[in-house]
Image (cartoon, helix red, strand yellow):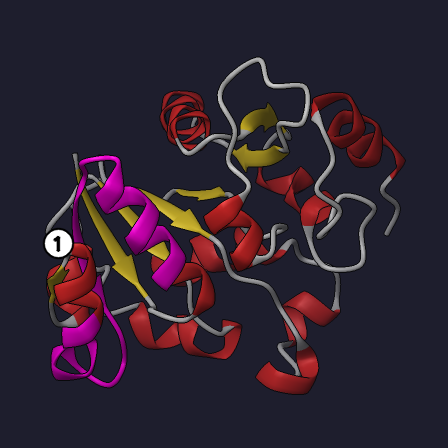
Amino acid sequence: MKIGIIGAGHIGGTLTRRLTKLGHEVFVANSRGPDTLQDLARETGAHAVEVRDAAHAAKFVVVTVPEAHVTNLADIFDDVPEDVVVIDTCNYYPKRDGRIAPLEDGKPQSKWVSEQLGHRVIKAFNNIQAQHLMEMGRPKGDVNRIALPVAGDDAPAKQAVMKLVDDLGFDPIDAGGLDDSWKQQPGTPVYATDLGADGVRKALAEATH
């Protein structure tokens, strides 16, 4: 499968490494240009490309950038085909991103991202540390398998992302639609806790604004 990754930080770099090892063709980009990604490309076999090319090269596009930079991608996604699934791994940190008024007013972060990009979005991979995403995948049925919540409004797209989560060695948990995606944002019971499937379901149910 062809997968675009916009952002090559901790999560983006980790997904590039994990997904190429699974045999996917990965197109990775960052704001500094493909020349800065040559080491990662040589290590993994991924294609280092411009951001626009990463957004248009695949059926899945992972957006994993600081929240304040999401608006910079709006024009790039204007002509991305409707059937492309955007996976949002971003988290909002006001100290880093500055105040974003709709998020301060309670709008779920991924709902805001979907509005900025004008595209359907699936929320995943935002509540796990990069090192754990890299090292702690386990075979299906392993009693120590970590579970990850996946939220989105498009059922087929969400199921496709959940399969990807499973392939990476984690139990995917349906966390509802984007209106419920706040339950996996920073500060919630499921955030950075490495829970199993039952623990994730319980943590999502216990989340409060």
Where residue 35 appears, as percent x and y from the top left, is 12, 83
Question: Residue 54 sits in which quadrant?
Answer: bottom left
Considering depth in this image, is 70 or 167 the residue closer to the camera? Answer: 167
Residue at 27% across / 75% down in the picture? 30
User: As displayed, is residue 66 above or below residue 96?
Assistant: above
Q: Amino acid at mark 1?
A: His
Please state the extent of the stretch shown in magenta in the rendering. Answer: 13-39
User: As displayed, is residue 172 above or below residue 89?
Assistant: above
In this rendering, position of residue 9 left or right of residue 40: right
- Secondary structure type for disc 1: helix
Note whether residue 98 is visible: no
In this rendering, position of residue 60 left or right of residue 111: left
Residue at 69% across / 85% down in the picture? 95
Question: Residue 19 sits in which quadrant?
Answer: top left
Q: Which residue is mark 1?
A: 56
Where residue 130 appears, as percent x and y from the top left, is 52, 58
Is 62 in the magenta? no
Where residue 181 appears, as percent x and y from the top left, is 64, 43
Considering depth in this image, is 119 or 151 the residue closer to the camera? Answer: 151
